[in-house]
Image (spheres, rainbow, N blue to C red):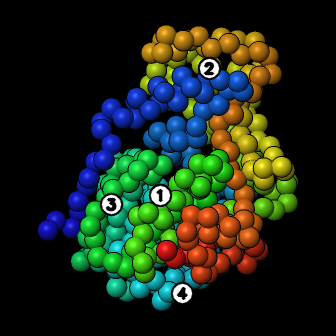
Amino acid sequence: MSPFLLTRTLPEDATDAALRADVLQGLTHTPKTLPPKWFYDAHGSELFEQITELPEYYPTRAEREILVARSGEIAAATRAHTLIELGSGSSEKTRHLIEALNNLSTYVPVDVSESALTQAGHALIDEHPGLQVHALIADFTARLTLPDTPGPRLLAFLGGTIGNLLPVERAAFLASVRDLLSPGDALLLGTDLVKDEKVLVRAYDDAAGVTAQFNKNVLTVVNRELGADFDPAAFDHVALWDARHEWIEMRLRSRTAQTAKIPALDLAVDFAAGEELRTEVSAKFRKEGVRAELSAAGLDLAHWWTDEEGRFALSLSVA
Ligand code: AVJ
């Protein structure tokens, strides 16, 4: 069997249909919203890579620190033969896990980006002869059908991306993850933790303005894909801490009263001066909250690891 298999579970035009539906829904609703998944075209993915290297953006470094320190323990606890990774992107941090998992035969990266899957998949095969990579082009928030691969399986969802889901969406997501697991399988989940408000806000409003560019890039995506005429410069980047929900919100604030046309939807969207469009929720967690959410989905928290500074956590839970 070829060491690299690629399965498309999304129809070629699914992305376009989903974008149209999300933009129509989100921009005709009060308050206006757009889901964060549309940040990640090629340019947005490049900007996100830059964010992960900013001095203010600690989550990537903190999670890597935990993976470097704990991969051996994760391998011993799971003895996984298959590693499944949701939202694998460049698979950069996953390397530490793949190297530590002695019994690993198969890696299943799941991402919406075919180019990221192909690139990362071939690089990993070069580094690990004998590793089978079965990449899935899929949206991890949709119902997933996984290839039949040897167990025990470790399903990893890293980066704190679960924080992009609202609490009800998280519950549904964790329940569907639980359904994918068999006895003996495990979930490795990355969660950013509640901390000082200034540290959190700085991580989403960096001095160099990269996060502001990343935020505004969603307007560029809508312009290109749906023929819209948003002027990104007519919006300000906003990052704020919602203490009640314990999440960071990113918004785009309209500098003036303006109207954007979206021809593909036959839609004109009015913004009042100062009106805000919510583009991202990034929830921050506490150990007991994570334990409770896992438990509600039928998963038992077995290990909880943080970086030295206690900024970010990796949890291992079992079905
Ligand atoms: C990729 C979802 C984990 O929420 O921290 C980074 C995305 N947004 N800066 C996050 C993001 C603004 C990131 N996640």
- The mark that comes first in sequence, 2 or 1, is 2
Q: Is residue 237 left or right of residue 279?
A: right
Q: Mark 1 points at which residue?
A: 176
Task: Identify the secondary structure beneath mark 3.
Answer: loop
Q: The disc labelled 3 sits on which kind of residue?
A: Leu
Q: Which of marks 3 and 1 is in front?
A: 1
Question: Can residue 212 be seen in this snapshot?
Answer: yes
Displayed quadrant of residue 150: bottom left
Residue hosting label 4: 73
**Mark 4 lies within 8 Å of ligand 1 (Cβ measured):** no
Q: Residues within 10 Å of mark 4 (few under 14, many from 20)?
A: some
* Callout 1 secondary element: helix
Q: Which residue is drawn at 34% across and 85% down?
A: 103
Judging from the image, what secondary structure is the residue with disc 2 in? loop
Badge number at residue 146: 3
The kind of residue tagged 1 is Ser
Tell me which numbered mark, 3 or 1, is placed earlier along the sequence. Answer: 3
Mark found first going from the N terminus, 4 or 3: 4
- Percent across and percent down for residue 269 are 63, 14
Measured Cα–Cα span from mark 3 to mark 1: 12 Å
Question: Of the residues tagged 1 and 4, which is closer to the observer?
Answer: 1
